[in-house]
Amino acid sequence: MLSRLRFIQIGDIHLPSAAQSKGALDDKDARFPSDLKTIISNTPIKQAFRKIYELVESGEIAGLVIMGDLTDFGKIDGYAACARYISTAFQVGANGQHSDMPLGIIPGNHDVDRALAKNASFTAKFKPLVAALANEGLPSIPVTDPIWLTFSAGGIAVRLVLLNSCWGCGSKEFIPDEFRDDVQDAIEKALSRGQPDKQIAAYYDRQFDTPAFSNDTIEKLLNAIPNASDCPVLVVAAHHNLLPQRLTRLAPYTELVNSGAVRGALQELDVPVLYLHGHIHEDPIELLQRPGGNVVATIAAPEIVKGFNVIELVFTRTSLPLTCRIIKWRFDQGGYLKQQKPVTIPLIGSRRRSHNDSLAPLYSLLLKHRELYWNQLKEEAKAIFASNVEEELEEALELLFSDGRIEIYNYELASYNWIVGARV
């Protein structure tokens, strides 16, 4: 078997509003017993957290990374409640049964209290978040410096770096000097009257924000990246996307203002990059690549009430990153959380040259038979591979699959369950 490493990407949680999200139940009878109602319809967040815990308990998960927006509208009590929920539900952090499991948490724009954002200190708005996490024995979010983690499994180690893209969130600096104070006073007046929750929601939704990475963060990231031999694939996690969201949004500074600089820097690296984010509440997977360069894959996680992602990295026998599989766990229309067909991204690029001699005859063999079970294919492949037939075959099939040349049925299972098909 080829080496594989799995970790879980968890999108925006948004407590307390996520706890109010109803399960798939058309609830029109107030007289129905509440305890039975709870049994037949759990809230989505409870189902998602339960499944994540089951995966953690399986021993197949190397780490967790949470995409920010733990709360709504800068409510520190909601943030603290979410930190407590994470530590107890997943049994992670200093006091949990899985205290040794690497855990990454990043700040989101909804985590920032706008009142603290007016403070002259740029870091003041992040201090209550760091304190709330520490109180539950959880690791800190990145504030001024990137935070590096290592996920490891089966002799493979992957470096993951957490970045703060929320430096400008809640700041008023982008308002022109000539009427900055007047506009700020008008915002404060609007927030203080009428329906507070509605006013605050409108304020956040219309994005008086300037999401950005600090130049210092980018510089420290680039100077700290290990060489390709020690870091075969780099995983970067931040709240905001590197690309504009699909849905046109007419609001000031909804996107990262210096995302282009970060994209360019990541595309120039000697290794493939997985850029994980949340924020947009959707789950597109988009690829960036310069001619002849390595891929930068941007992978979005949906908000938790829609599901989460398991990221699986597959490596060659020489520990080169071969493919990335995004295994989506999503709620269906009946309200059940189900595993969807994985999305596969090739990572090996031009480094596949050593496999060329075996790929052509293997592909021809598959075209000839159109479909073969693993055991049948293993026997046929003995004429192609001189030794280590199973390992060589699995690696070659992964390469052909990542190129879209073949179909592998039961791909989510161990290779001896595979049925491999090829069509012209």
Image (tube, grey):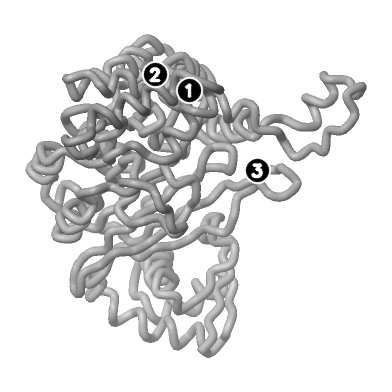
Q: CA distance from mark 1 to mark 2?
A: 9 Å
Point out residue 228 in the picture as x, y percentages from the top left corner. Answer: 15, 53
Residue at point 37%, 28% (across, down): 187
Disc 1 marks which amino acid?
Answer: Ile
Horizontal arrangement in the rendering, residue 77 relative to residue 181 (left or right): right
The answer to whether mark 2 and mark 3 are in CB contact below 8 A is no
Q: Earlier in the sequence, mark 1 or mark 2?
A: 1
Q: Which mark is residue 93?
A: 2
Secondary structure at numbered mark 2: loop
Secondary structure at numbered mark 1: helix
Point out residue 184 in the picture as x, y percentages from the top left corner. Answer: 30, 27
Residue at point 51%, 89% (across, down): 424
Question: Image quadrant of residue 356?
Answer: bottom left
Q: Do we see residue 310 in this rendering?
A: no
The answer to whether mark 1 and mark 2 are in CB contact below 8 A is yes
Secondary structure at numbered mark 3: strand
Comparing 269 with 116, the one in front is 116
Q: On the image, numbered disc 3 is attached to which residue?
A: 337
Q: On the image, numbered disc 1 is attached to which residue?
A: 86
Question: Image quadrant of residue 396?
Answer: bottom left
Point out residue 169 in the picture as x, y percentages from the top left corner. Answer: 30, 33
User: Quadrant of the image for the N terminus?
Assistant: bottom left
